[in-house]
Amino acid sequence: MSFSNPIPDIDDEIKDVNEVNQSDYTSLNGVYFAFIDVLGFKKTFDDIKISNENEIANKYRDVFNYYFSLMNVAKFMDKDKNSHCYAGQTSDSLYFYTQRPDYLMQFIKIFSHFSLYAMSKNVFFRGGIAKGTIYQKEQYQFYGDCIIGAYLLESNISKNPIVVIDKKTDEDMKKISGYEELIDTYQDRKYIKPFEFLDKKMF
């Protein structure tokens, strides 16, 4: 068998690696990573009917847009460009990370408010927050043990729509004013109270 158009050599398709910025991954210690996932997202789309596909998609669009509208106007997100503080999304999972416990405190307040809005749309979140190390290339390119820890809390522990906090994070956050008012305990696990801001102002 012969090909009229031979497969090109890879050297014809890529730039000289020396011409490309080869920035490496940087180690960031003491990072608090929050991994938040929609409860039942896969089942919702497995059961979806063509007639209400747009309605369901728009519901999630509104919820995700609201999360980022809150994060974009949060003052702490612009205060310190070198704080390695970032909020993002991949599929139905939202995430946030920072090295500063006071910024994490502000995130917890924002998430508590956001979660109430999501529940009003019949969208429920569960998740985990863990402390550890991130190896970061760009703000949206990273890996590390705190990400794994937060994911495992979400997938293995947070069976209900709650956000569980690991022991390292909890110990640090106890030093932050107002933190313990937002936290409850279930089976020796700390989690964010889901309805704490139902009748309160966020700040």
Image (tube, grey):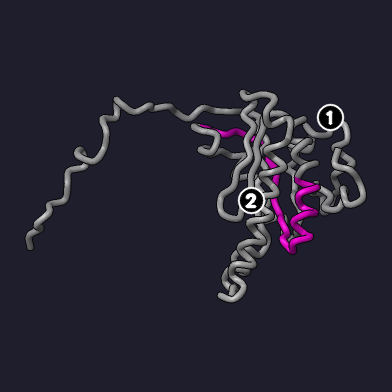
How many other residues sit within 10 Å of disc 2, few (<14), some (14-19) or many (≥20)?
some
Q: Is residue 94 left or right of residue 182?
A: left
Q: Which residue in the protein does label 2 denote?
A: 152
How many other residues sit within 10 Å of disc 1, few (<14), some (14-19) or many (≥20)?
few
Above or below, 52 relative to 24 = below
Give the residues drawn in magenta, as a range: 111-136
Q: Amino acid at mark 2?
A: Leu
Q: Which residue in the protein does label 1 denote?
A: 175
Q: Amino acid at mark 1?
A: Lys
Residue 3 percent coordinates (x, y): 10, 58
Above or below, 165 relative to 159 = above
Above or below, 79 relative to 45 = above
Q: Is residue 133 left or right of residue 112?
A: left
Instruction: Give the mark nearest the N terminus, 2 or 1.
Output: 2
Q: CA distance from mark 2 to mark 1?
A: 25 Å
- The image quadrant that residue 129 belongs to is top right
Residue 203 percent coordinates (x, y): 86, 37
Q: Which structural element holds mark 1?
A: loop
